[in-house]
Image (spheres, rainbow, N blue to C red):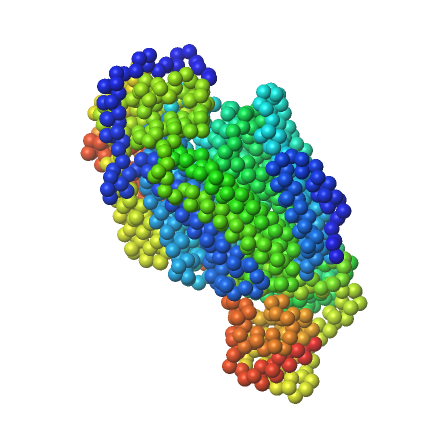
């Protein structure tokens, strides 16, 4: 309890029962889930989160079946159960599905489902964005997985190394991977933005940064990692797909490209990815361990620091996936040491859990069994991880079954076991019924035995010389019986999941409802009523503790009787509180939008761009992108930045909050800021490509190829920077309510931006840079086109603002639109400046 | 046949009985340990491709590192799991803040830092040795990975080179310098019994130095997924005494012997008539193709089709008639239209290319 003087107390007297009933009726009316076919228009976090979770589990089962097929094939030497081609498709899809369609989405799904509850919020700040992300994920995931049934699936491995995937694979398999997954990555980033803003801005009043539930801390770390890790992969996807579709030689060494650039971009994503899928499970452990130890977590600060530290370190390790590419010894040594170092924050987190168990009085349960089993298994994976991080050993173990064994110990022990434990833990919260302890134990033992029988021998087969990704093997290696044991183990493991699945799906109609807060946990999500109500929290509490249900007297009663904030929805809107980032002081009563189908349209048309692009139907893809843009604009127009009917609202406990805010206080501003950080990361990854080529070539730009010159890039840069200045002026004029000057600035900014984009294109165009001839023109063109596309988006945004003002949806006071657009243009200015410096300036110094 | 180091097994056996006292988790630990031990007992570390049956200096160094790390890992795992069991069973009130702080800081930060530092000093100190180029005058060999075979070029002291395929022979107790290249996609060159692997990257040349120390026949393999027949891209490695090696290398430099009997003569004409020479080279004949393995001394090789098949006449006939059945995606066309007699003759001719 860290009560500070001046913190509001709950109301002394509860409102009368009559008033309470009316309040509840109004809340239900505002938050009710649509029924019938309109159910699918829901955007509330509890519905979207549930769909998301179930979909992720379906993809998990699909990936699991693929694994079993592989194990059947490898049960015996020279087996012909699968053809080589099938096997390659299947191992590629197994990795792809598990990583992109299960591990990352399940984290986002569970977080969308639980985060608002944990923060005592009624919903996430952008419910329609979650829904959009979900539908994108469903469409993209189905598309990518479906390719397997048409014998068209990617077969380049989940790592997709060119030139195998650029020049040596016919068909659309690699395009499905590149475009289909880019689409899903966009959805993942959208969800990450939403979750980060949720943690930063949608906490209950009083939940200062040192009182945040550990799960939310982890979400913050993992969300930030997604923002910085996915864009390099997207940049790589762009380069590889452009090479495949238009023959720009980014990875073709004959024309100056280099396949290693892909490996860098992929692993700058790929290694943080491991922690992106692992840390959320640690987060679940951090919620379950204190509950079952009946004590607050030991070393809260240590856990937070360790999580943040892991996040940072994970970006410095990627080269350990490339130890055998002939890098200089000194870089190998540095990355080897850095890879070892990540064991330290991981160790701290594990020992904080152990210390919590030590001081607590442990209550046994299946949840804890999965946590501890996962911990014991994960530690094996961690220890073998230290071994493969040791470069000399990696020279032998790399790309063998040893690594397969290692990574499955980490991912099943570290990620999946805690998730299954988490399902046992949170299932009652979602459905008001328990899962069976007995079936849970059976599932646990089948899984842990199966896991070890499958993957322990793999360490051995690897060191006996069996490389990874082989569709068959020869008896001469002496690994026949080990492979057979692994295959048997995989079916034991799968049977554990079957038991678990049965437990989840079996009818529990005849079982009684659970009692509220069944595990006697202390965090806010357990405020959920039985049966659950759609409003989340009956009233949004003032929080003074990390475990308020346990620590704050009469807490549940006060929440239920509406003695805290926002106990009512007088105007019939969906409302939740926005608070300040550090101290969680209330700053806004945020109105969030309700059910809609516009997000479905946006998702379908966005999917159309990627899917039609896969088949090189460029015109149709173009039409689809216009439709997607229209849907998104319509969604923004109708669903965001409404001008409220009144300036402020009484949120109870003597506080009145503005309903509309703009600038750094607003969630929209933060979302734009975070999105643009990701966007800049992708751009920097492309710039990294430029300088990477410079480092590997003696003369870059190469002799005989003139660059884009100085005149056109500088002219384009000046025009676009002028456009940026005019955008700032437009924001200023809008605030001053000088309508004429505002429109003048916007129109001038748009014209300058068009002219600037034109000038930027003229640079490489006029100097005749042929992007198919060499990698230098290709990378210059990519950088220019990236900037021009961003200018295009900036132009649309400016016109949108002008239209909003003309339609009286934006005024001098209610100016969130132009404020966020100005923020976009700040990043745009940075993009332009970097572009001009690099393409026009760098050739002089290189 | 059980070629493992004493310290590793003693550490494993030593921990079995102690762990048995610590309840269910202890029993589990015992189970793992026993499984691990059994794994050694059943198979040992033997195998033509085993990294733990070193026949070279580098593999031996790494195997030693491995055994130390396995021993340490087992001990650490038992300690951590033991602590977890203790934490579960112990009553709460006996511990104060300092004890938990000791666990978190000691177990989570200090102990790993010390252990990892020691490991890094030990492990990284062998890096200069592993990465050091072979001294001037050592045998140098360029190996070029292709989908799905190996072009092997021995550089001779006088500056010329001789081109072979899919088999590498090395003199024992002498360092050898490999230059590694790729003609198409990324491959990885790995002879587990001799040392670590190094990737073959198109557009680059990577290096690997090996120090064979024991004569014998080993197998190398492609370790980087390279498409269709990645699983069938291997090669034989023969470590020989210096004299035998010199004799062999001299023999490999010579042009092909002409066909010695009627059957082989017919085979040669089949070979040339069906355009095999467009892809394959047989030095001393008109066949001078460059895109497929050199066959000048095909008959002297131990295995066929990048070690995918044994060196028998039936296997060879089957390979020529239906190469894709052995190696999916292989670029060699099928010669199923050859008559049985032609196939036999062709096989006889190739076998005779000693």
Foreground: B280 or B226? B226
Indicate left or right for A47 with B311 as reference.
left
Q: Position of residue A44 (x, y in %)?
A: 31, 35
Foreground: A597 or A336? A597
Residue A610 in view (yes/no): yes
Query: Which residue shows up at 46% across the image and 17% down it?
Result: A1
Residue A782 in view (yes/no): no
Q: From this viewpoint, which residue is outermost toward the left?
A: A807
Q: Position of residue A557 (x, y in %)?
A: 35, 19
Indicate left or right for A692 with A619 as reference.
right
Q: From this viewpoint, which residue is outermost toward the front?
A: A510
Query: Which residue shows up at 49% across the image and 60% down it?
Result: A87
Whether B251 is drawn above or below A758: the answer is below
Foreground: A514 or A456? A514
Q: Position of residue A229 (x, y in %)?
A: 47, 41
Whether A760 is drawn above or below A216: the answer is below
Foreground: A461 or B242? A461
Query: Which residue shows up at 52% across the image and 75% down it?
Result: B334
Q: Position of residue B22 (x, y in %)?
A: 65, 34
Query: Which residue shows up at 69% across the image and 68% down it?
Result: B160
Q: Quadrant of residue B216?
A: bottom right
């Amino acid at each position: 309890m860290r009560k500070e003087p001046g913190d509001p107390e709950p109301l002394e007297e509860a409102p009368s029962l009559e008033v309470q009933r009316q309040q509840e009726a109004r809340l239900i009316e505002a938050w009710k889930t649509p029924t019938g076919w309109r159910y699918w228009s829901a955007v509330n976090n509890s519905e979207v989160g549930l769909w998301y979770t179930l979909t992720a589990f379906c993809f998990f089962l699909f990936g699991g079946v693929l694994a079993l097929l592989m194990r059947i094939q490898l049960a015996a030497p020279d087996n012909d159960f699968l053809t080589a081609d099938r096997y390659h498709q299947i191992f590629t899809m197994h990795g792809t599905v598990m990583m992109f369609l299960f591990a990352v989405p399940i984290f986002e799904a569970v977080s969308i489902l639980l985060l608002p509850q944990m923060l005592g919020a009624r919903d996430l700040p952008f419910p329609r964005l979650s829904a959009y992300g979900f539908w994108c994920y469903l469409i993209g995931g189905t598309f990518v997985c479906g390719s397997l049934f048409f014998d068209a699936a990617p077969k380049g491995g989940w790592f997709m190394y060119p030139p195998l995937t650029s020049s040596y694979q016919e068909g659309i398999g690699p395009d499905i991977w590149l475009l289909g997954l880019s689409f899903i990555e966009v959805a993942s980033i959208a969800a990450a933005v939403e979750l980060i803003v949720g943690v930063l801005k949608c906490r209950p009043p009083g939940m200062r940064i040192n009182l945040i539930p550990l799960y939310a801390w982890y979400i913050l770390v993992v969300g930030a990692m997604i923002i910085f890790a996915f864009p390099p992969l997207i940049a790589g996807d762009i380069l590889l797909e452009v090479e495949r579709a238009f023959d720009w030689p980014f990875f073709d060494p004959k024309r100056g490209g280099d396949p290693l650039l892909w490996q860098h971009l992929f692993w700058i994503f790929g290694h943080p990815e491991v922690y992106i899928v692992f840390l959320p499970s640690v987060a679940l452990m951090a919620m379950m361990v204190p509950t079952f130890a009946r004590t607050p977590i030991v070393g809260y600060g240590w856990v937070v620091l360790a999580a943040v530290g892991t996040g940072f370190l994970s970006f410095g390790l990627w080269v350990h996936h490339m130890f055998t590419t002939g890098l200089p010894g000194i870089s190998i040594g540095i990355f080897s040491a850095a890879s070892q170092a990540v064991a330290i924050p991981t160790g701290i987190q594990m020992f904080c859990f152990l210390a919590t168990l030590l001081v607590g009085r442990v209550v046994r349960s299946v949840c804890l069994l999965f946590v501890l089993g996962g911990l014991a298994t994960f530690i094996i994976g961690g220890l073998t991880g230290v071994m493969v991080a040791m470069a000399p050993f990696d020279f032998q173990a790399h790309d063998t079954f040893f690594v397969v064994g290692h990574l499955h110990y980490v991912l099943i022990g570290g990620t999946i076991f805690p998730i299954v434990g988490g399902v046992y833990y949170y299932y009652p919260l979602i459905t008001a019924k328990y899962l069976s302890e007995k079936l849970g134990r059976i599932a646990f033992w089948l899984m842990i035995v199966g896991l070890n029988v499958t993957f322990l021998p793999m360490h051995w087969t690897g060191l006996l010389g069996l490389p990874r990704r082989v569709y068959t093997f020869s008896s001469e290696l002496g690994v026949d019986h080990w492979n057979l044991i692994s295959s048997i183990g995989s079916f034991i493991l799968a049977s554990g999941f079957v038991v678990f699945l049965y437990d989840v799906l079996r009818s529990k109609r005849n079982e009684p409802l659970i009692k509220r807060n069944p595990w006697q946990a202390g965090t806010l999500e357990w405020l959920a009523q039985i049966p659950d109500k759609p409003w989340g929290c009956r009233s949004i509490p003032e929080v003074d503790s990390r475990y308020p249900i346990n620590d704050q007297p009469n807490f549940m009663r006060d929440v239920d009787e509406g003695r805290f904030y926002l106990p009512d929805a007088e105007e019939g809107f969906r409302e939740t509180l926005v608070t300040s980032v550090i101290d969680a002081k209330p700053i806004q009563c945020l109105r969030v939008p309700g059910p809609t189908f516009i997000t479905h349209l946006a998702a379908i048309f966005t999917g159309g761009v990627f899917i039609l692009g896969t088949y090189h139907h460029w015109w149709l893809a173009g039409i689809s992108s216009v439709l997607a843009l229209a849907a998104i604009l319509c969604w923004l127009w109708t669903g965001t930045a409404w001008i409220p009917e009144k300036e402020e609202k009484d949120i109870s406990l003597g506080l009145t909050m503005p309903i509309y805010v703009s600038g750094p206080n607003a969630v929209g501003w933060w979302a734009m800021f975070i999105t643009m950080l990701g966007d800049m990361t992708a751009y920097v990854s492309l710039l990294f490509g430029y300088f990477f080529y410079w480092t590997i070539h003696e003369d870059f730009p190469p002799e005989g190829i003139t660059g884009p010159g100085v005149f056109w890039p500088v002219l384009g840069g000046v025009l676009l920077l002028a456009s940026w200045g005019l955008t700032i002026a437009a924001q200023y004029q809008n605030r001053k309510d000088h309508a004429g000057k505002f429109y003048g600035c916007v129109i001038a900014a748009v014209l300058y931006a068009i002219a600037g984009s034109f000038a930027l294109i003229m640079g490489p165009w006029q100097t005749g840079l042929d992007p198919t001839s060499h990698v230098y023109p290709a990378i210059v063109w990519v950088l220019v086109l990236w900037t021009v596309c961003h200018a295009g988006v900036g132009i649309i945004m400016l016109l949108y603002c002008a239209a909003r003002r003309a339609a009286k949806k934006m005024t001098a006071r209610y100016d969130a639109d132009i404020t966020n657009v100005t923020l976009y243009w700040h990043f745009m200015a940075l993009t332009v400046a970097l572009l001009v410096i690099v393409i026009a300036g760098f050739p002089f110094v290189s | 046949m059980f070629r493992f180091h004493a310290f590793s097994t003693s550490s494993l056996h030593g921990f079995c009985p102690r762990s048995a006292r610590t309840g269910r988790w202890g029993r589990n630990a015992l189970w793992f340990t026993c499984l691990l031990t059994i794994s050694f007992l059943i198979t040992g570390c033997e195998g033509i491709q085993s990294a733990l049956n070193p026949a070279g200096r580098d593999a031996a160094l790494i195997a030693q590192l491995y055994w130390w790390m396995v021993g340490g890992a087992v001990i650490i795992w038992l300690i951590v799991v033991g602590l977890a069991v203790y934490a579960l069973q112990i009553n709460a009130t006996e511990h104060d803040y300092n004890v938990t702080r000791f666990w978190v800081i000691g177990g989570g930060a200090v102990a790993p830092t010390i252990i990892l530092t020691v490991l890094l000093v030990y492990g990284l100190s062998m890096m200069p040795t592993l990465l050091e180029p072979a001294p001037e005058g050592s045998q140098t060999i360029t190996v070029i990975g292709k989908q799905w075979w190996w072009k092997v070029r021995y550089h001779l002291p006088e500056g010329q080179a001789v081109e072979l395929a899919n088999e590498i022979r090395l003199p024992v107790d002498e360092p050898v310098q490999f230059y590694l290249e790729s003609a198409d996609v990324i491959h990885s060159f790995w002879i587990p019994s001799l040392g670590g692997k190094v990737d073959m990257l198109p557009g680059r040349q990577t290096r690997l130095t090996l120090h064979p120390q024991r004569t014998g026949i080993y197998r190398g393999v492609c370790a980087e997924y390279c498409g269709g027949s990645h699983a069938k891209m291997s090669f034989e490695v023969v470590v020989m005494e210096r004299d035998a090696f010199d004799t062999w290398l001299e023999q490999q430099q010579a042009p092909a012997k002409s066909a010695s009997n009627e059957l082989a003569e017919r085979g040669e004409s089949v070979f040339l008539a069906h355009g095999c020479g467009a892809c394959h080279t047989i030095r001393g004949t008109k066949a001078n193709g460059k895109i497929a393995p050199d066959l000048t001394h095909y008959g002297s090789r131990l295995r066929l089709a990048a070690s995918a098949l044994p060196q028998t006449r039936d296997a060879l006939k089957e390979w020529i008639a239906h190469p894709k059945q052995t190696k999916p995606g292989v670029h060699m066309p099928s010669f199923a239209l050859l008559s049985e007699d032609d196939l036999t003759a062709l096989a006889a001719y190739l076998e005779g290319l000693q």
